[in-house]
Structures are given as C-alpha cells and as structure tokens.
Amino acid sequence: MDEQGFIYRRVEKQIMGLIDTQAIHPGDKLPSLRKLSHQLGVSIATVSQAYLELEKKGVLASRERCGFFLAPKALQMPAPARRPRPAMVPTVGTRSHLIQKVLEALGNKQLLPFGVACPAEELLPAKTLARLMNNGLRNQPTRALDYAPVSGDVELRRQIALRSLDAGISVNPDDILITNGAMEGLSIALRALTKPGDNVLIQSPSYFCLLQLLENCGLRAIEIPASTSGIEPADIQRAIERFSISAAILVPNFNNPDGSLTADGKKAEIVKLLSTHKIPLVEDDVYGEIYFGERRPATCKGFDSADEVIYCSSFSKTIAPGYRIGWMIPGRHYRKALELKTTTNICSAAPTQMAIAAFLREGYLERHLRRLRVAIHNQMESLLLSLHRHFPAETRASFPEGGASVWVELPAGIDGVEFFLKAREMGIGLAPGSIFSTQEKYDNFIRLSCTGVWNQAMEEGIEQLGALAREMS
C-alpha cells in the first residue's frame, strides 16, 4: 500500500474516517483538491484520483464548478446489533445438505460471486505462476513428475519458514508439513488430537466446512461467542470449567464469516490458558495475510512456548486456490501428523509446490499481497456502501479490519435460507447464516464475500438483493 500507485488510498482512508466519526455529514462540501493535497502532503493528482474513486463508489458527488460533496447515502451501515450467545452444550452438526448447496457455487461463473470466499481471477498472478510452472517442468521434468517428499518440497518449506517470521513464528523448515489446502491440515490435526465422541471448542459463528469436518469425524462442538473484537479468554475458561475438551480450533485473525479479529494480548492469554489445562489449540490462519491496517496481526503460534499449538494456513486465499497448497506446523504432534498425511494421500503434487516455491523465492509475493489487500478492501467498502443504499434501514453489517467477507444481519423475520435460495434463482451467490453454527442462532444472517473487483453487475446484484429483503420484510 506504500507503492506510489496506491497513495490515493491513504486519502480515501482519511475521508472514510471523517465519515465514520461523523466529522462530515451528507451534503457537506469537501476541501478543494489543492487544499487537501497541501494538508496531506500529496500531489493534487493523488487527491483527484481518490475523489474520483469515492465518486464511483457513491460516497462523493461532484457538482460542476462547485467541487465534491458528501453524497446523501454515503454513511456505512451499523454493525450487527446483537451477537446471539450459543448455548454452551455439546452439539453435533447437521448442515451437510445445505452446505453442499452453497458449495455448488464453486467454479460456477453464472452466479454473482458473493457466495464463495475465493479471489477473483483478475486478482490472481496467473501469468507469473504459469511461467514459473513451465520453467519447472522444462528445467526439472523428472522432479516435477516424481513424488514429492511426504513432508513437502524442501524449497517450499524453506520459503514458508522465512515468511513465517512476519507472523511472529520461528520455525525450522523440517518442522513444516505441506498439505492439500488448509482443510487437509485441519483434518489431520483433528485426527491426531481426537477420537469420535470428543468435544472440540470452536468460536461462533464458525466456517461451515469446519463444522462439516467435525460432523464427519463424529465430534461434538462446544461453541463460544465471538464478538467483533474476537474471542474472549473468559468464555474459554467457562467452557473448560463445564466440559472435558479434547482440542480447540480457533480463527483469531479475521474469522470467516464475521471477520472478527482477536487482540494480540488476548491471543497470548488464550494460548496460556489452554496450555495450562493441556488442551491443544489448532489455529486456522488462512486470512492472516489479508489485513487492511499497517501491520500483520500476530498469531497464537507466535506465543506458543510449549509447542502445543498446531498452526494451519494456505495460499488458497491469496495466490492460487486451484493449486491446493497449504501447510501446517504441528509442533510436538509432528510425527503423528506426518503419519496421517502419509496414509491420506502420500504427498501433495510436486509441480504446484515447485511453482509456489519459485513465486516466493523470486520475491513476487509481497507485491502481489499489497495489491490484493487494496482490491479486497476496496470491494468491501463498495459493498457496504451499496448495502446502505439498497437494503432496508434495519439491516446491519460488519466492517472487518481484514479477511474477505461481510457478515450481514437482515431485518428480523427474514429467513436466511429462503433468502439464499431466492437469490440463487436470481443468479446471485451468497451463504446463509445458519450454516455457520451447529445451533439455530443465525437464521436471519447472510455472508457476502468480497474477493473480486467491484463492477456494475455487482452493484445491480446488491440492488436486487435489497429489493428481495424489502419484499421479505
């Protein structure tokens, strides 16, 4: 975001901050290009670009020879008013059929892409990866066709170890295990730590594929509430006092679907608390790199002095969803994790590992991530403004500090599943809130993904959804 081409985003952020704090109101005139460029120490062209971008989003309106004004409906929606507290009881998931209907949107180009948290094609480094893949096939054809080591390509593990330092994790490449996406890592972790019938602590709401994984493993979920400020150690303590818990699976950084972020200090508390009670923690950090602030949030693994945290992540949300390259740092559970990996699929595909390793080694990742963060943040802002323009006044929505989805609370009485099915008939993908819990707690919620580039079709899609919400209210 520090690159010259993205400086205008700093100006946008300043203006959005003024709107959020109500320092400026709809109808107010904004400072002239010259005045704001002087105040912020940027060029007039940069301020002009920021104003034009905000005008495209509907935040500003220009008047000939008068300048720019705050548009009538520029305010963002309030956050969800309530956080349903799940009953603290062991629950077995029963959402598989509905989850499969939501997953039918994967690869379906006929649906507007609000239903799947997967970066749009235009945001992925397709040409660079294709070139690197071809180089690997041409220069090392035998290696590309052979089995990779069970633990993963050596160079890829080396690059991940270097990259992990940014997340506060110091790890030896030999302690990393390459997986087929983060989901395989989570599956291996659960199989290493639990047996059917065990209780697993999760936050609520929680990613539906994780709930389905628990269901398929015969495990029972103990749900604790997560607010916009993330997970509270006190809620974990209460669960520990009431139940025998075999493991915890948490997403402290930009949880899917609500985007909640747990403060770094609370992460340290959570790690210490679980370690004291000898409860292993599985950390899902697939969205940790998609942050909108100045720095990457810390990880629970970074506070793990007992080597008890199993860390899982992947490149599916940032570089190449179809390559299915993830990794895990199993800590003291490494041997068991390696055994389970071996008996699941022997190893991950060699050519894709080689291409991702080259992408990291040759320095492409950081520049790509800067552009991806800007694009996702930009779409999230556009989506929230569009929701405010088109949805009923009672609608509320989260505005996370990272991640790739917005958690929307529809007016009371609207059934999220019915809303999802009607939206599908209209050619619009989304995910109903009920699949993000094993309990009936989010019936009037939906998740909208923000992983593309905002366009007119998306604006019209949100307008259609808004009309549907009014009709169903």
Image: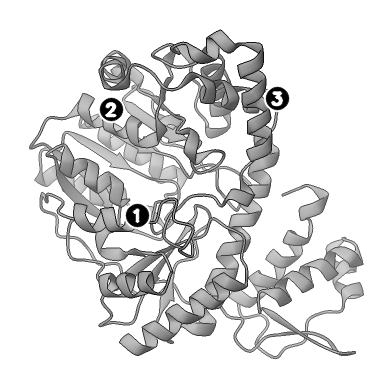
Query: At which x and y percent is residue 396?
Result: 41, 76
Tell me how far mark 3 sits from mark 1, CA to CA.
36 Å
Question: Residue at point 88% right, 67% down?
Answer: 37
Q: Please, is residue 399 above or below residue 152 in the view? A: below
Question: Residue at point 22% right, 66% down?
Answer: 441
Q: Please, is residue 394 above or below residue 103 in the view? A: below
Instruction: Specify the quadrant of the image occupied by residue 428.
Output: bottom left
Query: Closer to the N terminus: mark 2 or mark 1?
Result: 1
Tag 3, which secondary structure? loop
Q: Nearer the viewer, residue 325 or 267?
A: 325
Q: Please, is residue 21 above or below residue 25 in the view? A: above
Tag 1, which secondary structure? loop
Instruction: Specify the quadrant of the image occupied by residue 21.
Output: bottom right
Residue 37 seen in this snapshot = yes
Tell me how far mark 3 sits from mark 2, CA to CA.
31 Å
Position of 233 compared to 245: left or right?
right
Query: At which x and y percent is residue 246?
Result: 16, 33
Q: Residue 199, which numbered label?
A: none
Tell me how far mark 2 sits from mark 1, CA to CA.
25 Å
Query: Closer to the N terminus: mark 3 or mark 2?
Result: 2
Query: Closer to the N terminus: mark 3 or mark 1?
Result: 1
Residue 473 seen in this snapshot = no
Q: Amino acid at mark 1?
A: Glu
Q: Residue 104, which numbered label?
A: 1
Q: Nearer the viewer, mark 3 or mark 1?
A: 1
**Viewport quadrant of the C terminus:** bottom left
Q: In the rendered image, which residue does mark 2 sit on?
A: 188
Question: Residue at point 59% right, 56% down?
Answer: 376
Q: Residues within 10 Å of mark 1 (few under 14, many from 20)?
A: few
